[in-house]
Image (tube, rainbow, N blue to C red):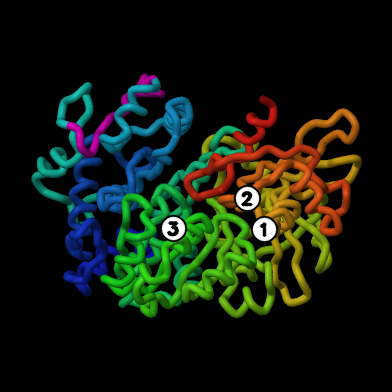
Amino acid sequence: MINSMNIAWWVKRWGELHPLKEAILYEGKAITYQDLYGRACRAASWLRSLKIGKGDRVAVMLTNCPEFMEIYLACSRLGAIFVPINFRLAGPELDYILHNCRPRLFIFGADYMEEIEAFSLARPTGEMFLASIGISSGLNGIMDYHGEMESVAEPLTGGEIPGPADPEEPQVIMYTSGTTGRPKGAVLSHRKTFFNCLNADIFFKLHFDDIMLIVLPLFHSGGLFIQASPILYKGATMIIHPRFDPHRVYREINRHKVTKFLGVPTVYRSLLKVPPESRGDLSSLKVCAIGGEKTTVELLKRCKEAEFPLRQIMGQTETSILLWASEEDSIRKPGTVGRPVFHAEVALVDRGGQPVKPGDVGEIVVRGSIMMTEYWEDPRRTAETIKGGWLHTGDLARVDEDGYFYLVDRATDMYVSGGENVYPAEVERVLKEHPGIEDVAVLGIPDETWGEVGHAFVIPKAGAELNADDVISFCQGRLARYKWPKKVSFCQEFPRTSLGKVRKSLLSEISEG
């Protein structure tokens, strides 16, 4: 394989060109590019001693930490497949993923021992090694990762380890959140990572001197492929936080003069709750990105007032960045999620796969170097998603005459009431304008008369006194009557994925209960 498409090679080259350049800042410690490559090679040597090689899966369940990155690099160096796992998963969900991908090695943090013990560790097929960061060696047959690293006599840094020979070989299996069913393992190639890094380079205007603050989990595309990997490609520096703390974010921006940042809307809403006098100087920030869910125009305005130089991105696990919008785009085209990234083709099609006219609703489809290869050992769902070379995202949108996309909803969220299609995102947008509503999520529920009707789950603002009639009547004059929710429930918070998206499948369970 061309070395330029292997992320481990990038770290090796930066370690040769600028050995003392800081690659990672973590909890007050600095790791240079030279040190990071050495650590990755030591990890690769250990993996090889376990007979792990090309095509074998290595699963990790860790908070953001340097070990996460060095194992990721070691797998890329070997040609093994890296499988990052959401550490918020419950036992049965974790059990499903491990049995689906059948890793040869599973590395987890000591904090998750309770979750590990909650499910069956019966080896899916053959032997699965277990290792932990923070647990003494030998406990229940679990290896101590740091102890194993220290025991590596001679890390292999040269050409002794056969790496991937083809950029189409899988680099990562990243499981989707599973909000609509069983998680799907998106198989992501070395080629995809490379072209995604090129897109991120353009979007963030990356530079060798940049400092990227990462608070999003590295087990998701946003943290790993939109932030960490492009930073290593550019030879820049990343600061990684194990967990999001809005006050700490401001301290780090001021202390290290952070230049680049990415957060989901939930992150920015938390940052905006910090009093302005406690935020410090944000002038070092050059590009801040927001994505992960549809962003309201109000939130964009509030972020601009707070001096976050905000740009929007839209993507998914299967593609990473797909659409982007500059600060100017967001102001000039309120509500847009932007235009297609440089290295991809993006279109809108109807249910028959035909292009739709500007202004009409269609499904976003994409093809090119940034799309996944397949869903791991799932030919049926792969065939449902990739048709004629186009990856169907499941996102519904409109496009204007200038080529700017406007999200309408997820195709799977749409419900039909009295023969009319209703897009919950449209209803949510209107209800969020209510002065007493902090947040709202709408889904369709069965109805004997209309087939389906809307059920609105509402989080009231502090001090607001609301009832169901207040919520429903607010739709008058703002939405067609068939779009009005017929049922309203009040909540203190929503169940969310690790990226801040509302888990509507759980709201549905509340509705049914």
* x and y percentages locating residue 438 in the rendered image: 60, 53
Badge 3, how many Cα within 10 Å: few under 14, some, many 20+?
many
Label 3 vs 2, first from the N-terminus: 3
What is the crowding at mark 1: few (fewer than 14 residues within 10 Å), some, or many (at least 20)? few
Which circle marks residue 225 in the picture? Answer: 3
Please identify, in this view, whether the residue under mark 3 or under mark 2 is nearer the observer.
Answer: 2
User: Which residue is located at x 46 percent, y 57 percent?
Assistant: 270
Q: x, y (%) of residue 425?
A: 71, 52
Quick one: SS at disc 3?
Answer: helix
**Image quadrant occupied by the C terminus:** top right
Q: Earlier in the sequence, mark 1 or mark 2?
A: 1
Q: Which residue is mark 1?
A: 435
How many numbered marks are there?
Answer: 3
Question: In this rendering, which labeled residue sits more in front, label 1 or label 2?
Answer: 2
Circles 1 and 2: CB distance less than 8 Å?
yes
Q: Is residue 179 left or right of residue 229?
A: right
- The residue tagged 2 is 464
Left or right of 32, for residue 481: right
Which contiguous range is marked in magenta?
120-135
